[in-house]
Amino acid sequence: MSGAFKDNYGVTSTEELKAVFNSPIARGAFGNSLEISIKTAIIGAILGGLFAWAIASGKQGGVFYKVSVALSSVLAQFGGVMLVFAFLATFGFNGLVLTFATKFLPTSFLADASWLYSMNGLAVLYTFFQIPLMVLVFLPTLENLQPQWREASDALGGKYYEYWIRVGIPILTPSFAGAALLLFVNSFSAYATASILINLADFLTPLQIATALTSETGGSNPAEAKVLSFFMVVVVIIAMTLYALLRRNVSKWEQRR
């Protein structure tokens, strides 16, 4: 992190730090990174949480449980070249879906592959590996919900919604929020998927860092890359600090349990 306070000659300076902070291009890329990370973290957390709840509601150790957990483990690591190729082969300009949509649904959005190369398209790809990651992270918390608590609530005359408002949701909220923060960090630091699909240096901060380090046109600027990395690390530290605080609350509840 100290490299962010030095120029390309190793001299201590804050000029590059100020230049990147005031750069509209850097701000735009940083804003795009935050936007797509927040969106995919929220969507991934909600959908992944629902899938995890469906898995936890079934029989633990059953076929559905084992297949779902194994599939989530695989898909959570399914990114980069493999993921982009799969989506291009399916939704790309010569993809299977576009071929059929052009013939049978020519007015639908599926007949136009341009959406895949936009911010929304990249968000879809990110969400694809965010959902199974949420399943893996949030499933243990759902499994820790004791059926006796629901039975006690019913015995005391509590209704279904009262159990979730007073017991279920308060217990699950810290873990859910912590898992969403992990998804945010996971998306915020992702590089390979965006690099292969869009490959625009000023689109996301990780792409901008790569360009500053490996420019083939003589425009490399390691000091700029270090400053951009510094700003990313600051965001990650904030997110992980919040996650640690949430996990502390969950740990206290588990110890009391």
Image (tube, rainbow, N blue to C red):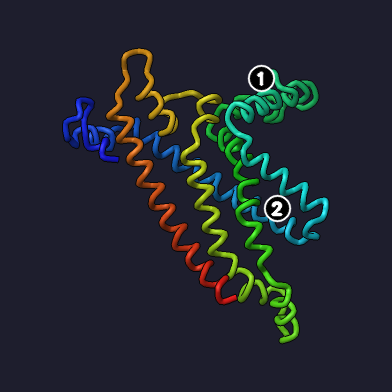
Q: Quadrant of the N terminus?
A: top left
Say the numbered circle drawn on residue 3. none
| Residue 167 placement (x, y as % from top left) | 62, 74
The residue at the point 61 percent across, 47 percent down is: 133
| Residue 232 placement (x, y as % from top left) | 38, 41
| Residue 223 picture quarter | top left
Label 1: state its secondary structure. loop
The residue at the point 53 percent across, 64 percent down is: 174
| Residue 113 placement (x, y as % from top left) | 64, 25
Tag 1: residue type?
Answer: Phe
Label 2: state its secondary structure. helix
Q: For the residue carrying disc 2, how many other residues have a C-alpha within 10 Å: few (<14), some (14-19), or many (20+)?
A: some
Q: For the residue carrying disc 1, how many other residues have a C-alpha within 10 Å: few (<14), some (14-19), or many (20+)?
A: some
Q: According to the image, label 1 marks what residue?
A: 93
Q: Which is nearer the N-term, disc 2 or disc 1?
A: 2
The residue at the point 64 percent across, 59 percent down is: 140
- Nearest the eye: 54 or 145: 145
Tag 2: residue type?
Answer: Phe
- Nearest the eye: 156 or 149: 149
Marks 2 and 1 close (CB-CB < 8 Å) = no
The residue at the point 50 percent across, 43 percent down is: 37
Say whether residue 198 is left or right of residue 87.
left
Say whether residue 42 is left or right of residue 99.
left
Q: According to the image, label 2 marks what residue?
A: 51
Q: Residue furthest right?
A: 63
| Residue 166 placement (x, y as % from top left) | 61, 76
